[in-house]
Structure formats: C-alpha cells, structure tokens
Amino acid sequence: SSRFEALPLTAEAFDGWNRFAEESDDAWFWHTTHWMEFTEELARPRFIANLSFSIVANSETLAICPLILERSSWSDESNRFSCASSPIPFPAMRSDLSSETRNQLLKFYVQRLASLAKDHGAGHVSVRVPAVARSYLSRGLPFANPLLKHGYIDLPYLTQVIELKKDLRILWGEISQGPKFHIKRATQLCEVDVWDRQTITAEKFREYQLLHQKDAGRVTRSQRTFDLMLDWVRRGHAVLVEARHAGQAAAFALFILFGTGAYYGSSCKDPDTPDIPASHLVQWEAIRWLKKARFEWYEVGHQQFGPQWFDPASPKDVSIALFKRGFGGVTIPLVT
C-alpha cells in the first residue's frame, strides 16, 4: 500500500470527484460533494471540517473517500467522523480494479482513517455501504462486512428496497392491504404532480418547504438546506412528488436519484387534512414514475423492529418502518 497516496479534496476538484462517483459501481449520491455540502449545513454547529480524500497511484484516482469531522452530540465525548451524525459512506473504488488491489486500497483507507483520527482527536467512526450502489445489489451472494478484518464491529442495520424491474402489476401486488386501501381512496380525492428538473419552479419548492414547516410545527432546518435540495432537483438528482386535494397541497415527498437507484429522502403532509391518505398515494405514484424513468431500485428506508443495543428505536421509529414496509420490497442488510 506504500504506492498509494491520499489527496485531500479541494473545491477545485469537486467536478472531477463527482464524475468519479458517477462512474464507480460502489458510489451513490452519499459520495458526492452535493451531499457533503448538505450534511455540512445540517450538522452546524457540530461540523468541524471536510477531510475527504481520494486515493491515488501513478497520478490515477483509484478511490474516493468521503470523510467529515464533527463534534460529538454528547459533550463528554471526543470528535467523531460522521455525516450529520450518520455513518460516512464506504470508499467508492474504480470499477475495473482487481480484488487484490481493492483489498490493498481498503487497508490503506483504514490506516489513513487511524492517522487522521489521531491528528484531529476523533474517537469514533461509523462506515456504511450504500444499499442501492450497483456493486452491492449485483453481488448475488451474501458477503461479510469488509471492515471486520480490520478490527471494526459489525452493526446489523436493515433497510427496505423495492426492485423496480418487476412488472407494475407485481409491484402493486406486493403492497400490503392497508396501504392499497389508502392509495385507492386517495386516488379519488387527490391529484398528483411530479416535479422534475424540467418542471420544478422556485415557487413550487417554496410550497413544499412551507408545508414541511407546517407539518413539523416549527422550522427544523436552515434555508440553505432547502436551497441545496432544490439544486438537486434542478441537476436531476432528485424529484418532488405532490398530492393535491381541492387545489391545495396535501402531501409532498422528495426522492433522491443517482445511477440506477432512488431513495426516499424527505416528506411532509398537511396536518389540517389528517383523514386524506395523500402520503400513501405519493409513494405509489413515485414508484410508478421511477419505474417509467428506468430506475432499477428504490430504497424506502431504514427498518427498525424494536430497540437494539446499537440502535435505540422508539415506538415512533418502529411505526415509521412499518409504514415503509407496507409498500413492498424486501428487507436487506444495511452493511455498517
């Protein structure tokens, strides 16, 4: 691994970094500078520095390694490597590398993390393989957490993924009876629009932001986080789905797009219309749109069945996971 060199990410290298992410089968949106900027803003005032680096040999980039340094949520702990308190993405390597080279790169990566942790007083890191990265979903056989051999602890998180390559009738058949009933009812009460890079407007996105605030009962995030999300839609990295009742927005959801995968990113509904199941309809219409747009996988999100030693899920968390599972798909490991 002595032939490898770690190059810190600079603003001038953003475009090249993102191009590498688009070409690597290991990468997903979590590897891009677009996501880094968002988590940097989301983590304030705990954000300290972006220490992301690429691994280079003979002037060729072999891997990109997102790495954010943050203050711990607990005052008595040291700093930590995380993205807005969530795990950092596993390194995205060039897709044509041999298994031997990949193993050497991983060893170099672990050594680099240890060195940076010592330099910056970081006492904790959590690393996660993106669930809808092409290389993960195309493996076929199960595989062990690649960091176990380097002394890391496996945290058996789970997520729910829908295979969009299936026939639409099969996808509908996999939805639970309760959500089906709500979708049919909402179809009679609501109209749906999908706002993508061609149709999104600042005014429509502002509607989403205001409903998000109304649903939460307060402002939960800075204006910049919403500005960045609007930029994702304009770049084609997200799509906003809206359900309207009587001419008013009843629910929104934002879905993040990258490669062949999509992710359920953010949602809100009008608390003044609790009897209208608009959020169920938004999910189904998103599945239909994603399939038509030739996305292959949709990650509905984190699955929690009860509290674990590494994940103290609340009853609300368990209820949200049940809602997500209702739209079908399979529960798979979220390798962490």
Image: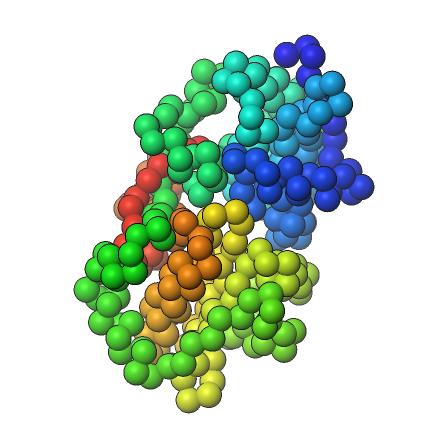
In the rendered view, tell whether residue 296 sits above or below residue 78.
below
- Relative to residue 66, is residue 243 drawn left or right? left
Expressed as whole percent of the image width and height from the top left, the position of residue 325 reads 29, 54
- Towards the viewer: 57 or 131: 57
The residue sitting at 62% across, 32% down in the picture is 65
The residue sitting at 52% across, 36% down in the picture is 25
Residue at far bottom of view: 246
In the rendered view, tell whether residue 254 sits above or below residue 97.
below
Residue at far right of view: 12
Residue at far left of view: 177
Q: Quadrant of residue 123?
A: top right
Expressed as whole percent of the image width and height from the top left, the position of residue 116 reads 68, 24
Q: Quadrant of residue 197?
A: bottom right
- Relative to residue 115, is residue 255 drawn left or right? left
In the rendered view, tell whether residue 303 sits above or below residue 52.
below
The residue sitting at 35% across, 51% down in the picture is 165
- Which quadrant of the rendered structure holds the N terminus? top right
In the rendered view, tell whether residue 194 sits above or below residue 155.
below
- Which quadrant of the rendered structure holds the C terminus? top left
Colour pattern of the rendering: rainbow
Expressed as whole percent of the image width and height from the top left, the position of residue 186 reads 31, 77
Expressed as whole percent of the image width and height from the top left, the position of residue 172 reads 26, 62
- Relative to residue 183, is residue 289 drawn left or right? right
Q: Is residue 17 visible?
A: yes
